[in-house]
Amino acid sequence: MAGRKPRATAPGRVTMEEVAAQAGTSMISVSRVFKGTGRVSAELRARIEEAAAKLGYVPDRAASALASARSMNVAVLIPSITNTVFVEMLAGIDEVLSPRGYQMITATTFYAPADELRLLRGLLAFRPDGVLLTGIDHLPETLKLLSSATVPAVHMMELNNQPGSYSVGFSQEAGGAAIARHFVERGYRKIGFVAAQLDPRTLARGLGFRRALEEAGRGAPRALMVPDRSSIAQGAALLDRMLEEHPDTDALFFCNDDLALGALFRCLRRGIAVPEQLALAGFNDLPASAWATPALSTVATPRYQVGRDSAAMLLELMAGREPEMARKDLGFTLHVRETS
């Protein structure tokens, strides 16, 4: 009786069968390890991974996708790959998706809605099983594209109230308001808001900050807002501009920690006592903020957890299940330190 014809493979390509033989197990177990499906003991997983490494095995995702009608890819769109906030968010996403056999296809929008639309259109051509997007402020064409592609999507870092949408994040407005209330409680009266980049999340923080000051009877804050890229150097330059225009300012909220740290360093260089002469606060609680001298007051945002929970929510949607909640608010923490 003629034997089964072996499956054709590229010349020199190591097959799953060879990995199974090397590890002394079945192809099913090898498949489970590399697809991230089913339960495999830690000892057997280690044996299979060792065999794959020894043979130089690379999973054939194209063949797997054809067989399962799944690409095992997730499209992830973020505004920046250099901003620590989004790097940590990506780490959280990867920690959830990788063990389940998914890989991220990441694209950077550079805060441009038109680029986001163009990149999403290109990513959808690879037929991802799901999409993770930053924020909720998208072009109508982007939302229409997502809807017509019938691909599950989760919005990250902000909360979406639209029916049928899914999001994981926190209230940017509430974060800005928390800083405003802190300034009011400390007795500051000549208060300002400084911002760069001016993406929707930055504008939402500023809006919350202004509303809280007005509710407290302080009136609208002095505002200095520029569309330029945010950086520590930009923070120093904007501090100079704000104090040139309003030398009696006694408290400043910077829309992120990069700007706030730059302002703090400039104050030290100029001999401005912080917080005695000028109080400072930032947003995001970057690693350096707690270790600056004096330590920076700021709002800590749960970007790593946002990544994890967004990926977990997307896994539920890709499996055809409704998540426990469509809108998950992770909140934030106000860290009052030495600069205010």
Image: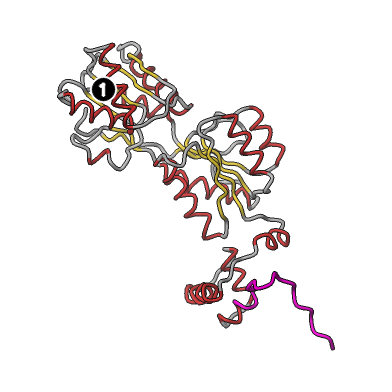
Label 1: element kind: helix
In the displayed structure, 275 sits above or below 21; it is: above
Residue under label 1, please give it.
183
Q: Quadrant of residue 220?
A: top left
Measured from the top left, where is residue 239 in percent x and y?
28, 21
Measured from the top left, where is residue 120 in percent x and y?
62, 39
Residue at far front of view: 11
In the displayed structure, 237 sits above or below 167; it is: above
Q: Which residues are magenta?
A: 1-19
Q: Quadrant of residue 218?
A: top left
Query: Count the marks: how many?
Result: 1
Taking the magenta stretch, the answer to whether it contains residue 15 is: yes
The answer to whether residue 277 is left or right of residue 254 is left
Q: Quadrant of the N terminus?
A: bottom right
The answer to whether residue 70 is left or right of residue 325 is right
Q: What residue sits 33% from the left and 13% below the top?
A: 222
Dot 1 amino acid type = Phe
**Between 305 and 22, the one nearer to me in the picture:** 22
Q: Quadrant of the C terminus?
A: top left
